[in-house]
Image (cartoon, helix red, strand yellow):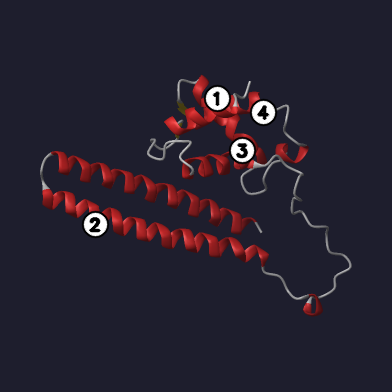
Amino acid sequence: MQQIHDVLDWFNGLLEEINNAISAAKETAAQALREDNDDRMRLFVERTIAMKKCMEHVKALRKEWATIETISIPRKHAIKNKKASPSTRIKKGEMTPDKDYVIPILGVLEAMGGRGEVKDVISHLYDVMKWQFKPVDLTPLSSSGENRWIKTANWARYNMKEGGLLKSNSPRGIWEISEKGREYLKKHGSHR
């Protein structure tokens, strides 16, 4: 059901915004510490702690929401429908997994000087990965019409930010490699 995936995307966007707010609060606390303003520093440390607590709640809700798709009717209660259409759910191995996007994304960003606008990164990423895409990757999503691989690339980006390979405090619409991402790319090879 597409709505479940749309809400998961919303959760990912919310988590990204909370992460940006946490980074901003940390920076404000650090600035207050440098300015020897203890009250302001304590205020923003407390806000950071509260935001992190909220983030954990959102992560828990996202995890709980993701389980909704696994709910099924026990076989003995299912209504038999001989005309039911075959499942449109993609089976494992039919599409390129998001882990296969990591090195290409890092390589594209490095080639672009370390950062780039989403549309440019996606365009370059297609050029790098088009040879390894499976037919399912190139099918359009019913919800947005964009090719499935673009959504997978965005999931990969989200996981890379969570893992510290991409900067989490980049401006909206910008993907930016982190120092950890550069080290990972050097260690694990390039996309070319």
Q: Nearer the viewer, residue 108 or 7?
A: 108
Rendered location of residue 155, percent (x, y):
57, 44
Residue hosting label 4: 129
| 3 vs 2, front mark | 2
Rendered location of residue 4, percent (x, y):
60, 59
Taking the spot 48% from the left edge, 32% from the top edge, the residue there is 181
Distance between the alpha carbons at the discs numbered 1 and 4: 10 Å
Above or below, 172 against 187 in this view is below
Rendered location of residue 3, percent (x, y):
60, 58
Distance between the alpha carbons at the discs numbered 3 and 2: 38 Å
| 2 vs 1, front mark | 2
- Would residue 116 be seen by someone viewing this image from the given angle? yes
Distance between the alpha carbons at the discs numbered 3 and 4: 11 Å
Other residues around mark 1 within 10 Å, as few (<14) / some (14–19) / many (≥20): many
Rendered image: mark on residue 46: 2
Label count reads: 4
Above or below, 92 against 72 in this view is above
Sequence order check: which comes first, mark 2 or mark 1?
Answer: 2
- Would residue 147 be seen by someone viewing this image from the given angle? no
Rendered location of residue 105, percent (x, y):
56, 30
Q: Is residue 11 left or right of residue 169?
A: right
Sequence order check: which comes first, mark 3 or mark 4?
Answer: 4
Query: Are the residues tagged 4 and 2 within 8 Å (C-beta)?
Result: no
Could you tell me the amino acid type at mark 4? Met
Residue hosting label 1: 108
Could you tell me the amino acid type at mark 1? Val
Name the outermost residue toward the right.
82
